[in-house]
Image (cartoon, grey):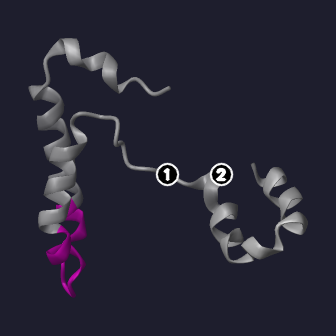
Amino acid sequence: MEACTQHRRPAQPSERALWPFIDQMPRAEFHPVGRSTWPKVRDTLRQRIGAAVEPGGDRRALLKTLQKAAQAAEAARPAAAQPEDVAP
């Protein structure tokens, strides 16, 4: 994609403000919106992120809590639901 992005630049100077974001796309990581367990993890993150980023906040504890929430959500899923989470 990077080569494609570089090729487009001269033809699209009006999109110059977007170039830094376009350049990052090959390395971008997105949260798992297609996973049925993601809402539980996302809700836990939303509830606890504030305390984790405050001075003296325990980011490691937040990550452990998120991991536990993800594992609990996965364990609670019926076995038939597993194929949904296969990446395309």
Cα separation, mark 2 vs mark 1, equals: 9 Å
Q: For the residue carrying disc 1, how many other residues have a C-alpha within 10 Å: few (<14), some (14-19), or many (20+)?
A: few
| Label of residue 44 in the image | none
Residue 72 in the image, given as x and y percentages of width and height: 11, 36
| Label of residue 26 in the image | 2
Q: Please tell me which residue is depicted at 24% across the width and 43% down the height of the picture.
A: 38
Q: Residue 63's image quarter?
A: bottom left
Q: Is residue 4 left or right of residue 27?
A: right
Q: Amino acid at mark 2?
A: Pro
View extreme (top): residue: 80
Q: Is residue 46 left or right of residue 4?
A: left
Q: Residue 54's image quarter?
A: bottom left
Secondary structure beneath dot 1 equals loop
**Are the two marked residues, 2 and 1, in contact with CB atoms closer than 8 angstroms?**
no
The residue wearing badge 1 is: 29
Q: For the residue carrying disc 2, how many other residues have a C-alpha within 10 Å: few (<14), some (14-19), or many (20+)?
A: few
Q: Is residue 22 left or right of residue 64?
A: right
Residue range corresponding to the magenta coloring: 49-62
View extreme (front): residue: 14
Q: Amino acid at mark 1?
A: Glu
Residue 51 lies in the magenta-colored region: yes
